[in-house]
Amino acid sequence: MILLCLAALGACGDMIENIRPYLDKGETIYVGKVDSLHTLLGYNRIMLVGYLPYGMNQTSYSITVTDPEGVSRVYENSVSRVNLTDTLEILFEELKEGQYSFDMTMYDRYGNSSLTVTADGYAYGDFYRSTLLNRRIERVEKIEEGVRITWRAMEGALYTEVSYLNEKEEVIFLEVENKENSTVIENYKPGSLFTW
């Protein structure tokens, strides 16, 4: 029995030795990290969006942005907390097309840091634009009010822009929402072309 107790005490001593380097460093203070970090994608731009629900002690942030070629740049800025839950929106513009990585760390006024949070995003550009397909037309017919264009269904588009020449030879632009199945072009100049 005594041997068993001595063995248990010896085993506990080894456990403390395993964590002693961490105990010797002292207490670590972490700042509240950004939550639900995500990206909103656009044409040669990306907006980084996150929430600050933890505490009110964040005073600045650092973002390391890695571009499609693997080059990293660091952006730093201050944060002014107003509400218990705040939203951060940071817009990166004039980006070349490709995949980007964003590593964000929050800081308090004493230089304590949060855990780093990562989000990825793709900046669209000319190559992506060249792969987009136009909405297809089912038929074009002359009606009393002008010309009716009947559209085929298309997934993912927001709208279709139609331009045409009216009877006064003015160029008219229409935005046709994706949910519309047909569009009537009034005052259309007969024999002229329209684009979409």
Image: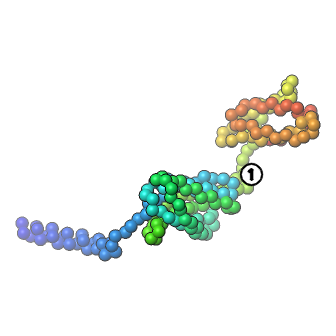
- Colour mapping used in the image: rainbow
Q: Amino acid at mark 1?
A: Ser
Q: Quadrant of residue 127?
A: bottom right
Say which residue appears at 9% left-offset and 70% top-offset: 3
Which residue, given by chain and number where applicable, does mark 1 sit on? 130
| Spot occupied by residue 57 in the image (x, y as percentages of width and height) | 45, 62
Q: Which residue is pictured at 58% across the width and 67% down the height?
A: 75
Q: Is residue 95 above or below residue 129?
A: below
Work out whether residue 170 or residue 182 is closer to the camera in this orientation and state it.
170
Q: Which residue sits at x=11%, y=68%?
A: 5
User: Residue at horizontal 53%, vertical 60%?
Assistant: 80
Quadrant of the rendered image containing residue 10: bottom left
Number of other residues with Cα within 10 Å of mark 1, as a class: few under 14, some 14 to 19, many 20 or more: few
Residue 131, percent from left and from top? 72, 50
Q: Is residue 165 visible?
A: yes
In which quadrant will I find the C terminus? top right
